Image: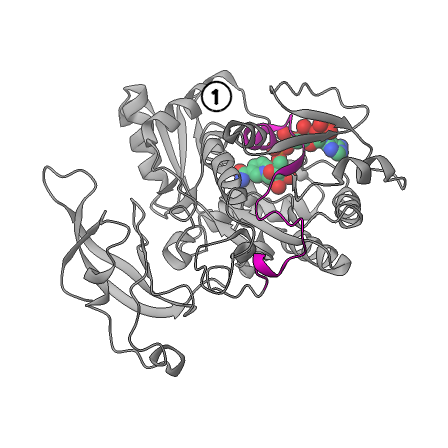
């Protein structure tokens, strides 16, 4: 641990305060960077601070804060002890792009102008489509099934009905032609082979970037994905995209959606607003990342507004190509169940006495859920999935390990109580589907 310093929030360009306290660096690859170029600091409101050295280096100082104490009178500033370690950057943030805009053929445009989205009438799809349109930067096409009864009502959205279930993908390919990015947000109940068909059509139409159906877990955490039945889906989508050799995938790791999960019943974050009951998993003090729908929408819109490629060798800006075949990590909040409960009590004006609080072992819940799913009872899937996320050091808090891309994407710090109010309303009114 280092000496106490003020760490939150410090200006994004000011990483020197931490660099001065860096431990000796022994990795020869890092020593070759001598002198170390200060880069940019990325600070989250609730912990998991990290400092990037330089994008070319591929390394960063990872800073974990301890013993944080609020500074009276200064909101969000804390005095903390630090543990600083050096580690490799997530590979998308290292500047590994070999393609440069200046080398592209005539007619190449170094920005995304045309985007297609599957599921634009859905829960996350509608938010992403709306965020894309709000930027005014993209022509956005919603691809919807010919027999869909979903209402997609967004001004400026081009709607195309195209089958993505059968063998004839001509309508789909034609809808995708000229599109640079495809975002797939399909219901979890969609047939598994639909994604492969969309990927194949995107390859035929030369779509360069695909956001596969994911929008959740940290795909780099094998044990979390294995225990959550997600590995097969993750690997098949990657392999399928790679097999065609045309598109790059980009996973959005946002973890569980906050409003949806807090308001979505006891099987999710443990809250039942209709019965005012809370199930704490273990002691309710395991932090996890969670993101609101608007934050997910902003993340995708912002990512696609990056330059596609660096202009030339001297262009060190972050480009979309940095994220190709990688994961974008975002987060609205890093919270324990107890943090959520405090927010719920604030916005509902209730106290502990108004709630029935029980405790269950997260591991036991996960085992029970898993046994049910293995017997074919998919109603237990949600309980299994959420319980696993709350295992101590189980990967639900990816921010402390990997940092997030919030700053690179210009994502705002959000108001926890405002988001909690929305979740409480949704929970009380039973607005959330029970599918996942
Ligand atoms: N992080 C989280 O907490 C969380 C929670 C739930 C889901 N997710 C992820 O987000 C993705 C999108 O979920 P969502 O809840 O936003 O989806 P959704 O609203 O349930 O459905 C999105 C769209 O899927 C299409 N669809 C519905 N049934 C289909 C079928 N049988 N075959 C093909 N398409 C069908 C519909 O589009 P059209 O009618 O226009 O064709 C629908 O609007 C999921 O697959 C999952 O990966 C994450």
Residue 123 belongs to magenta span: yes
Q: Which residue in the rendered view is the most extreme toward the right?
A: 168
Asked whether the viewer can see residue 380, the reply is no
Horizontally, residue 399 falls left or right of residue 187, namely left
The quadrant of the rendering that contains the N terminus is: bottom left
Magenta region: 99-128
Q: Is residue 17 above or below residue 371?
A: below
Which residue is rendered at x = 25% and y = 59% of the image? 15
Q: How many marks?
A: 1
**Which residue is tagged 1?**
426
- Ligand 1 falls in quadrant: top right
Which residue is rendered at x = 81% and y = 26% of the image? 146
Q: Which residue in the rendered view is the most extreme toward the left?
A: 72
Which residue is rendered at x = 40% and y = 54% of the image? 392
Q: Which residue in the rendered view is the most extreme toward the front?
A: 106
Which residue is rendered at x = 43% and y = 60% of the image? 316
Q: Is residue 213 above or below residue 2?
A: above
Locate residue 216: give its quadrant: top right
Label 1 secondary element: helix
Where residue 42 appears, x then y in whole percent? 33, 52
Where residue 152 appears, x then y in whole percent? 66, 21
The quadrant of the rendering that contains the C terminus is: top right
Where residue 366 appears, x then y in whole percent? 53, 48
Where residue 262 appears, x then y in whole percent? 44, 31
Horizontally, residue 2 falls left or right of residue 142, namely left
Locate residue 409: give its quadrant: top left
Residue 203 belongs to magenta span: no
Locate residue 174: give its quadrant: top right
Q: Which residue in the rendered view is the most extreme toward the top?
A: 429
Horizontally, residue 302 falls left or right of residue 230, namely left
């Amino acid at each position: 641990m280092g000496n106490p310093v003020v760490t939150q929030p410090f200006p994004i360009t000011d990483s020197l305060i931490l660099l001065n306290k860096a431990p000796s660096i022994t990795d020869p690859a890092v020593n070759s960077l001598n002198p170390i170029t200060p880069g940019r600091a990325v600070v989250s409101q609730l912990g998991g601070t990290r400092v990037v050295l330089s994008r070319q280096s591929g390394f960063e100082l990872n800073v974990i804060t301890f013993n944080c104490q609020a500074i009276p009178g200064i909101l969000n500033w804390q005095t903390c002890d630090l543990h600083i370690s050096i580690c490799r950057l997530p590979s998308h943030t290292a500047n590994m792009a070999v393609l440069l805009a200046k080398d592209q053929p005539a007619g190449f445009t170094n920005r995304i102008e045309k985007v297609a989205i599957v599921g634009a009438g859905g829960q996350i799809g509608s938010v992403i489509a709306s965020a894309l349109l709000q930027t005014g930067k993209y022509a956005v096409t919603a691809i919807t099934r010919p027999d869909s009864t979903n209402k997609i009502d967004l001004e400026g959205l081009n709607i195309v009905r195209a089958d993505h279930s059968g063998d004839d993908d001509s309508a789909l390919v034609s809808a995708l032609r000229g599109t640079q990015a495809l975002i797939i947000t399909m219901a979890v109940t969609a047939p598994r082979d639909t994604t492969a068909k969309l990927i194949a059509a995107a390859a035929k139409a030369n779509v360069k970037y695909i956001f596969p159906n994911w929008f959740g877990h940290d795909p780099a955490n094998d044990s979390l994905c294995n225990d959550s039945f997600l590995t097969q889906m993750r690997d098949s989508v990657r392999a399928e995209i790679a097999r065609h050799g045309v598109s790059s995938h980009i996973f959005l790791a946002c973890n569980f959606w906050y409003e949806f999960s807090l308001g979505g019943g006891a099987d999710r974050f443990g809250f039942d607003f209709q019965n005012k009951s809370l199930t704490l998993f273990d002691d309710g003090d395991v932090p996890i990342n969670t993101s609101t729908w608007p934050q997910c929408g902003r993340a995708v819109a912002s990512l696609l507004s990056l330059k596609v490629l660096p202009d030339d060798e001297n262009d060190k800006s972050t480009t979309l190509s940095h994220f190709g075949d990688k994961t974008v990590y975002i987060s609205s909040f890093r919270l324990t169940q107890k943090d959520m409960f405090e927010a719920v009590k604030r916005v509902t004006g209730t106290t502990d006495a108004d709630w029935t609080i029980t405790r269950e072992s997260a591991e036991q819940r996960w085992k029970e859920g898993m046994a049910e799913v293995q017997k074919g009872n998919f109603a237990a899937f949600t309980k299994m999935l959420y319980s696993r996320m709350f295992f101590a050091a189980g990967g639900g808090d990816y921010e402390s390990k990997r940092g997030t891309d919030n700053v690179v994407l210009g994502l705002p710090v959000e108001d926890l109580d405002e988001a909690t109010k929305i979740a409480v309303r949704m929970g009380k009114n039973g607005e959330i589907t029970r599918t996942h």
